[in-house]
Image (tube, helix red, strand yellow):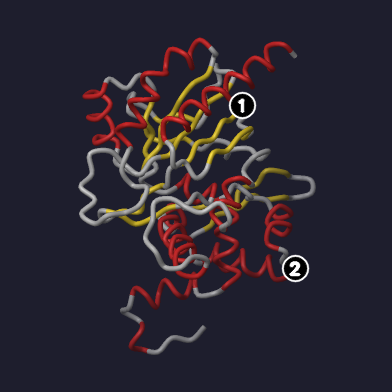
Amino acid sequence: MRMHNADETCGIAQAAMVLGDWWNVLVLREIARGHVRFDALAAGIGLSRKVLTERLGRLVAHGVLQRSLYQRRPVRYEYLLTDAGSALLPLLVAMQDWGDRWMLGDGSLTATAGEDGAEHARVHALVGTRLPDGLELPGTQGANLPLTSPDAAATVLFTYPGTGIDWVESIPGAPGCTLENRLFRDAWPDFRRAGVDVRGISTQLTPAQAEFARTEEIPYALLSDARHQLAAALRLPTFRGAGRLRLKRLILVADAERTVRHALFPVTDIPHGVEESLRLAEEYARGRRSS
């Protein structure tokens, strides 16, 4: 692609050199989802091997992907995000947010969703799939943590917009995060008796999450997806509020092997959502122990 001289100092034009191609964006989307091997990429995108090879070569040359050898005979590579590539994840999530709101929706700003839309379909399609291997997020308990607890029969993951936020404008579905955390806190003994762990996830920074956890005596880990790694990997629904992309409220129940067993979305009745996640997690844990 040739550039006019006037574009040489324009960051938008430079980014368009990398992202201005439909296939490049979809390749990055699939790699963010954990599809890092050639055959998985080809299947996920429906792209010919010749064109995929060309696009991967360009993204490596641009410095957003790197090749990592995982098999010598025959030679096979995985394609992994570099630091520059990881820095594109917020842009991919912002593109999805824009598409969900303006192309697949009616343009309304909302922290929830209808039960007949694209966001609903994407979340419920997660059932039966595995959460990304190796993805860890910063936690309030002082270290990066995996998405699921290896010592629990199941893990309940709930995403929420954020706590202690002045939303300025009225956004349907945005309030209630403190209530949600308090309800999970109060139900924590029941989750533990069932052998189930709980993890809350928002795009707030860890210090803000940690202060909230101390104030509210939250016993489970809160994880920060401020870099949008999880949102990009699972194509989670988001909205923009109070100057940041926020995760819409949903609940996933995953087993010890990171397979999603249940998905609750949209969560409009918060007490019911907490109760239902406990019921589903207990049911799965009992079935696992009896099998």
Return the residue at label 1: 255
Where residue 73 appears, as percent x and y from the top left, is 79, 45
Amino acid on which disc 2 is placed: Ser
> Which quarter of the picture shows residue 124?
top right
Q: Give the residue at x 68% y 17%.
A: 288
In the rendered image, the residue lying farthest to the right is 74
Q: Give the residue at x 25% y 53%.
A: 242
State the count of labels.
2
Return the residue at label 2: 48
Q: As rendered, which of 168 and 27 lies closer to the eye?
A: 168
Q: How far apart are labels 2 and 1 at the CA level?
A: 35 Å
Q: Residues within 10 Å of mark 2 (few under 14, many from 20)?
A: few
Where residue 66 appears, as percent x and y from the top left, is 55, 54
Q: Give the residue at x 60% y 55%.
A: 30
Q: As rendered, which of 48 and 1 lies closer to the eye?
A: 48
Between label 2 and label 1, give the one nearer the viewer: 1
Where residue 166 appears, as percent x and y from the top left, is 20, 47
Image quarter of the C terminus? top right
Q: Residues within 10 Å of mark 1 (few under 14, many from 20)?
A: many
Provide the secondary structure element on which disc 2 rests. loop
